[in-house]
Amino acid sequence: MFLSVASLNSGSNGNCYYVGNSKEAVLIDAGISCRETGIRMKRLGLSMQNVKAIFITHEHTDHIKGMDVMAHKYQVPIYITEKTLNGGRLKRNKRLWVHFNADEPIRIGEMIIHPFSKFHDAADPHSFSIEYNGLRVGVFTDIGSVCENLIAHFQQCDAAFLEANYDEVMLEQGSYPIYLKNRIRGGHGHLSNRQAFELFTAYKPKFMSHLFLSHLSRENNDPTLVHDLFYKHAKGTNIVVASRYKETDVYRISRSGTEVASPPKAMQASLF
């Protein structure tokens, strides 16, 4: 038994994450075009026919850009909260929209999706962990600060996509206007490398096989810097940096070991 996971894109230009077993899968967010999602999945040997649901974390464009077209083309339900619909002024399709509530598990085939609320500057932001046959994979991005909900879910994960958006020094010394800097680091924006690292070192379960560092800022972070920070303290957890320009490999997560299920790329750092 295993869960296959991949980042199809991760960053302010679009976010989409694949988690599935051998029969069914879900996408967390649909922030790149339907066409590009299909192209990247095909390169990885994945099929949209296995995707049984799309879960939306919040209404920002980099998380919903491909949502409407994807839902219509593949007739796949969109799990989204009422407040997120209203906050994003999104079109309504009663047949495809499915509302959910925090802390109420949702069954998709043999998988159970666990939504929980988080801190972010959106109408009703949520993150998710996906459970299957005792395995858990978390998708934890767009989080302003570490909260008890995040800690509780992170401690149960065999693998996790964890935001490491910015280096604090790079942000402070960078060209962003002060209001934007304060939005990013103000508790409802994004996790810094340091905040993500402190969560990882304090609460990483012994059985966590992979950590995917996600949603890196193009201007305020460096893939090599953040990879090296986590790698030195990984203690058996494989560290992968998710690209803002291209999909990762597919990784098969299981308690007996983790297998790369798609051909490895020459250099992960070259994707940034």
Image (spheres, rainbow, N blue to C red):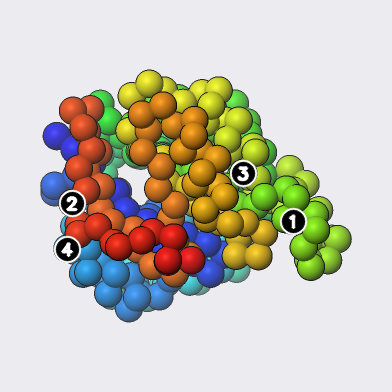
Residue hosting label 1: 171
What is the secondary structure assignment of the residue under circle 2?
Answer: loop
In this figure, what is the number of numbered marks? 4
Residue 201 visible somewhere in the drawing: yes
Question: Could you say which is closer to the camera, residue 30 or residue 186?
Answer: 186
Q: Looking at the picture, how far across and down is residue 39, in whole percent?
A: 27, 74
Pointer 2: what residue?
261
Question: Compared to 30, does 149 lie above or below?
Answer: above
Marked residue nearer the N-terminal end (4 or 2): 4
What type is the residue that disc 1 sits on? Leu
Compare residues 197 and 97 and report the one nearer the observer: 197
Q: Residue 226, image x and y in percent?
A: 55, 47
The answer to whether the residues at label 4 and label 1 have Cβ atoms under 8 Å apart is no
- The residue where tag 3 is placed is 193
Residue 228 horizontal side relative to residue 255, left or right: right
Which label is found at residue 45? 4
Type of amino acid at the residue the image marks with label 4: Gly
The percent coordinates of residue 224 (x first, y second) are 52, 53
Amino acid type at image mark 3: Asn
Labelled pair 4, 2 in contact (Cβ < 8 Å)? yes
